Amino acid sequence: MEISVYRLTAMLAMTLMLSGCGPMASGYLDISDRFAMGRFDAGRFTPEQVLDGAADDRMSLAAPRPLFGDTVSLYWHKATLPADLFEPGKEYLVEIPYPLLDRVDLWVRDADGAVQYHRAGALYPFSERSIPVPDLVFPLGRPTGEITVAFAVQTSTPLLTKVFLWPREAWEAQQRKRQWWYGALVGGIAVLILYNLFLAAAFRDSSYLYYGLYLASVNLVNLIHAGYLDAWLWPDTAGVSARIILGLLAVSLIAIMAFVNRFFDARHRFPRWRRVSLVIAALAIPPVFPDPLGYPEWNIVTIPAMLLLSHLSMWYVISVAVLAYRRGMHQARFVILALSIFYFSAILYMLYVMRILDYTPWLPHVLEVGSFLEGAILSLALADRVNLLRAAVDRACRETMEARTTFSKQLIQAEEQYRERVSGLLHDTIAHSLLLIKQRLDALLARHEDTAQNDAMPEIAQQSHACGELLDELRHLSHDLHPHLLTRLGLKAALEATLEKALSPRGICWQADIEEIDDQLDEARRILLYRAVQECLTNILKHAEAGEVMFSLRREGERMVARIKDDGRGFDPAVIDDDALGLATMKGRLALFGGNLKIESAPGRGAQLTLELPLQHD
Amino acid sequence: MDRKPENLLIVDDHPLFREGLKQVLSRLDDLHIVGEAGDGDTALTLIERLAPDWVLLDLALPGRDGFSVLEQARRNHPGIFFVILTSYDDRAYLERALALGARGFLVKDSATNDLLDCLTSIRSGNRYLSPSLGSRPPLISPPLPAEALTELTETERAILARVARFMTSKEIAEELGISHRTVQNHRANICAKLGLKGTHQLLAFARSHHPS
């Protein structure tokens, strides 16, 4: 059930992703190749100079582009867009599809020489943007002729400067889809995080907590990358520093390793591997803090370092999961699958950022997709783990119960065997010796019948009589200990004899309807039924003051059902007194064999006890 | 007792008790003790080989028990007089033994005193049961034809139907609005008409004829 819900969620999310994150984007034009680029110190040229072409000879279409920007240089880009790119009267935009750039200042000069200035970027307040969206988008107005676009990028992040030309309508259509996509993504991730927190609380298992933390930090990074956090959290301030991103990355890689360590109990199973994770975690902390030496290019060291550590942590968690799987931990399969998907998406994203993979509309979002899929699949793993744990607990419970039942049955059996032995001993040795004594006394009496004058004769007769009484008592005792009638004649005869012996001498009228069922019950169950009926009779004799007892034993479906009814004074079944202890014991014994005892009675209304015992043998 | 000597086999697993029996039986001149057996299988072998006229048979024997010996031997030798000699005084055993064709049933306690009477009584064509067991009616009587039902009155049939529903006399009295005593009388009458000895079997009969 849980699993199918997750599959459904994952499928839904995939569908949303497809339309939202870009593959179907259309209507834009990649104009990156039209932009000449040059690197200058800040303040070397004014925007007007660049637009006028003062820097043209130091800019080129084929200028080498470094992988990363830096905090001191400006990367100027400039292109002249001919009138035939624009349909008259239509509104146009340019997009630089990498919201992580620190500062982008853009000037547009139209055919009439009017200049518009716009700026956007992670380190500019969001509220200053001309078009308030997370992507870096700038309006071009409705060009009526050739326009010139120049922009300066200053960033410590990778220097990705693709430029797209959008008709406004097409862009808005794509934008709507994207909002859907981010809504679904953020909502889905939030649900997954809450779910993990809930599991952490419910099972007091910190691995869920770590995973929730990981999900939160990774997706915060994603949202920062996508530019949304600027829009939502700090629209009026100058953006988020690289420190925060590095901090979140550090949290995420520490959390995912902590999760995997807890989940697979690495402390005990993989202690040496675990040390690797501790080293990676320790190395991830320093880059989070501001540069200690005032080194201006600190980010140029820390960002690649953190990226490297992120990769190492992914390698670590996937390796541990594979190891765990090979050691037979079933639930590791989900972890491997999920982390591999995420890692694959991270590599794609990295290749994109490093410009090894060329831009396609979905590449900037591949990490988000990967992260969401990972979250969905891993939550499935956690649910799987819950199921496994529950199954293990259930199994343990069942085994304990079975062991207890078996033990109890063995105890009962041992007790019966012991009783049988004692009963046999009483009967065969003591009773028999007594019998022999009586036999001799009687023979003595018979021999001297004629010489009745012997004074010893009355004494001998008395002793013989005493022997007889003792024998009677021994017989009762022996039969109480072990019902030989049951063994020799079967349940029906034994029960009838018991009813007769217990009730008739006390003038209690009884009726019985007993099926011959010996072949349908094993000996343990026959003895159990017999003893249970005995116990019921004992109770009737002790408490009921009955005039009549009705008894029936028959098979009803797959159960043997015995009913004992008396017309005595009855009682309130809810009020169990100490004397009911015998009944409680019987109830327990019946329960061991899957049976039960039901009591129906009310004061003044007699009582009916129903004993049920299932047929099947163990 | 001037008849030709008869042969007797004693089956009991206690040698001392057998000795006691032999002493008692020695008073009968026309009875030969031809063998003794201490367990069921030996008993059967000896019965085959010696073809005795009498067998004194204990019920509790090692291995094959007395009932089994009785059943087996009666099949091949219906003419043998079997006297059960047991330390059990349960009527269930008595009834089983009689059903299997035993002619006498003696409780060992009083065997020394009653054995000779028992043999004499059986010789003259009767069954003999220990006096301590003999007086009460048997628990089991033969099954009854359903026609007997026609002899019952309307009220008696109503009562029988309620007995079949597992109702006690008190409950029946309450439901029919008659006195407890009256129900008991009716019930006794029903048993008499149906030939049931005692009311123990009334429930079984009522159920088999009112399968409700």
Image (cartoon, coloured by chain):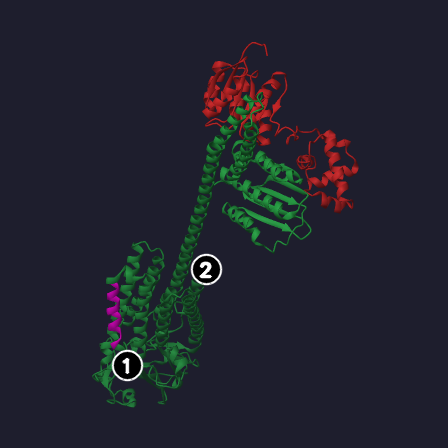
Chain colours: A green, B red
Judge the density around disc 2: few (<14), some (14-19), many (≥20) Cα neighbours within 10 Å. Answer: few
Q: Helix, strand, or loop for circle 1? A: loop
Q: Is residue A377 left or right of residue B148?
A: left
Q: Is residue A332 magenta?
A: no
Residue linked to disc 1: A155
Instruction: Please give the name of the residue rendered at 61% of the width and 23% of the height, measured from the top-left corner.
Output: B128
Closer to us: A601 or A471: A471
Number of disc labels: 2
Q: Position of residue A514 (x, y in %)?
A: 61, 36
Q: Position of residue A389 (x, y in %)?
A: 40, 58
Closer to us: A410 or A578: A578
Numbered disc in front, either 2 or 1: 2
- Which label belongs to residue A563? none
Residue type (three-letter) at the residue carrying disc 2? Glu
Q: Is residue A283 magenta?
A: yes
Given the image, what chain letter belongs to the residue carrying mark 1? A
Residue linked to disc 2: A2
The Cα atoms of the two marked residues, 2 and 1, are separated by 46 Å
Q: Position of residue A56 (x, y in %)?
A: 24, 84
Closer to us: A175 or B61: B61
> In this rendering, does residue A62 appear at all?
no
Q: Is residue A82 above or below residue B156?
A: below
Q: Is residue A162 left or right of residue B128?
A: left
Judge the density around disc 1: few (<14), some (14-19), many (≥20) Cα neighbours within 10 Å. Answer: many
Quarter of image, res B154:
top right
Q: Is residue A117 above or below residue A189?
A: below
Residue type (three-letter) at the residue carrying disc 1? Thr
Residues in magenta, as a range: A273-286
Earlier sequence position, callout 2 versus callout 1: 2
Q: Main secondary structure of the magenta part?
A: helix
